[in-house]
Amino acid sequence: MLGIEKEFLVFLHAIITGVFVTAVYLNLRVLRRIFRHALWVINIEDFIYWIFVSQYFFVQIYHTSNGEIRWYFVLGVVIGAILMHFFVAFTKKIDQKLSDLMEKKNGKTIDKSGEKR
């Protein structure tokens, strides 16, 4: 049986794993917006992504808990993914506020019709 300190470190490692896997997928989504893809290419990308994620999870579980799937590892991955989504939403809000501030500073405001005033 693992000690509580070791289990806590495994839990933190699982959170980092969830953050990493989510960040990789978010970067893949950004690349899809920059470079338009056909649907079949997106499907292949997703397939390769999930192959990578399954292998990455396997390696992480093998190294952290000797290949035993523990409930707190799964919980840590989910928490890490949720934290990453909150982080991205927070940075989007900050980016929007900074953009609005810069527009006000430059004296350029855009009304609802899309025209600059």
Image: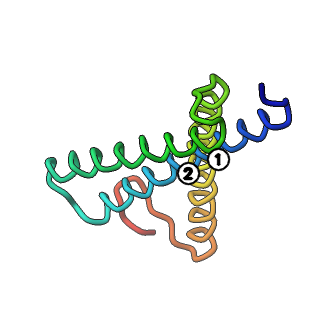
CA separation, marks 1 and 2? Answer: 6 Å
Given the image, on which type of amino acid does mark 1 rest?
Answer: Ile
Which one is in front, 29 or 72? 72
Given the image, on which type of amino acid does mark 2 rest?
Answer: Phe
Could you say which disc has been placed on residue 16 in the image? 1
Relative height, residue 92 to residue 7 (above, below):
below
Relative height, residue 20 to residue 35 (above, below):
above
* Residue name at image x 31 percent, y 59 percent: 33
Name the colour scheme.
rainbow
Q: Dot 1 lies on which element? A: helix
Which one is in front, 50 or 56? 56
| Residue annotated with mark 2 | 20
Residue 32: x %, y % from top left = 30, 58
Please report contact status of discs 1 and 2: CB closer than 8 Å, yes or no: yes
Using residue 46 as the reference point, say whether residue 109 is left or right of it: right
Relative height, residue 36 to residue 57 (above, below):
below
Residue 81: x %, y % from top left = 56, 39
* Residue name at image x 63 percent, y 22 percent: 71
Quadrant assignment, res 67? top right
